[in-house]
Amino acid sequence: MTTDEGAKNSGGSPAAAVAERGEDITSRKDRGVLKIVKRLGNSEETPMIGDKVYVHYKGKLSNGKKFDSSHDRNEPFVFSLGKGASGSYPCQNVFFPHTLSLDNILQLVNVREAVMVPNEKKSQVIKAWDIGVATMKKGEIELLDFKGEDLFEDGGIIRRIKQKGEGYSNPNEGATVENCAFLGNFRI
């Protein structure tokens, strides 16, 4: 059952259906982003910070009216998880309404009504996408695929950040890097 169907059956709004049954996936447990999985994925792997993620979505206002859909364009939305507000994001002029339905599989909920905002405020939208999509698994329909950042564009070194660090400094060439883990194989 989708949230739309649940709202029709209960006489309530789609947002109320998600708010009632959604799992709070925020770190503060403030119910800022709720998730309902309608079909389990076929993998335990989830995307990591910086991974390129491919999703289909349907943006809806709190009254249920659709205002954007990747399916209408027949093209998934592609973005780098956790990279902030750069690039082109879905529904970039809208601060998300009660429900952002990724095809009614992943439901992202915000307690505020939808309002129009300037493009520079779109990070508010993306934060909810980052939180929600980071918990999805391959096969949960909308998370079509994800892959790490190919540092040299030859498939040789793929960077995947498991946990975001603190600070803004980057090591210079020849610098010593501490507390760093490398996973994988090295071939000469």
Image (cartoon, rainbow, N blue to C red):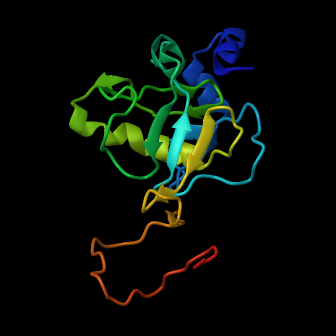
Residue 35 appears at what percent x and percent y? 62, 38
Quadrant in which residue 14 is drawn: top right
Q: Residue shown at 33%/29% (left/top)?
A: 92
Q: Would you identify the image quadrant in which residue 139 lies? A: top right
Left or right for 159, reference 17: left
Seen from the viewer's position, the closer of residues 174 and 155 is 155
| Along the viewing direction, whichever of 146 and 49 lies nearer the viewer | 146
Q: What number of labels is visible? A: 0
x, y percentage for residue 134?
56, 49
- Residue under the point 50% across and 53% down: 51
Q: Quadrant of the C terminus?
A: bottom right
Question: Looking at the picture, does residue 31 appear above or below residue 117?
Answer: below
Q: Quadrant of residue 18?
A: top right
Left or right: residue 32 versus residue 122 is: right
Q: Nearer the viewer, residue 6 or 117?
A: 117
Outermost residue to the front: 188
Task: Report the residue at 55% width, 43% height from top.
Answer: 133
- Give the position of the N terminus as an image quadrant: top right
- In this view, 1 is above or below 44: above
Is residue 39 shown left or right of residue 135?
A: right
Camera sees residue 45:
yes
* Residue 31 appears in view: no
Q: Position of residue 83 (x, y in %)?
A: 38, 52
Q: Is residue 140 left or right of residue 173?
A: right
Q: Nearer the viewer, residue 162 or 19?
A: 162
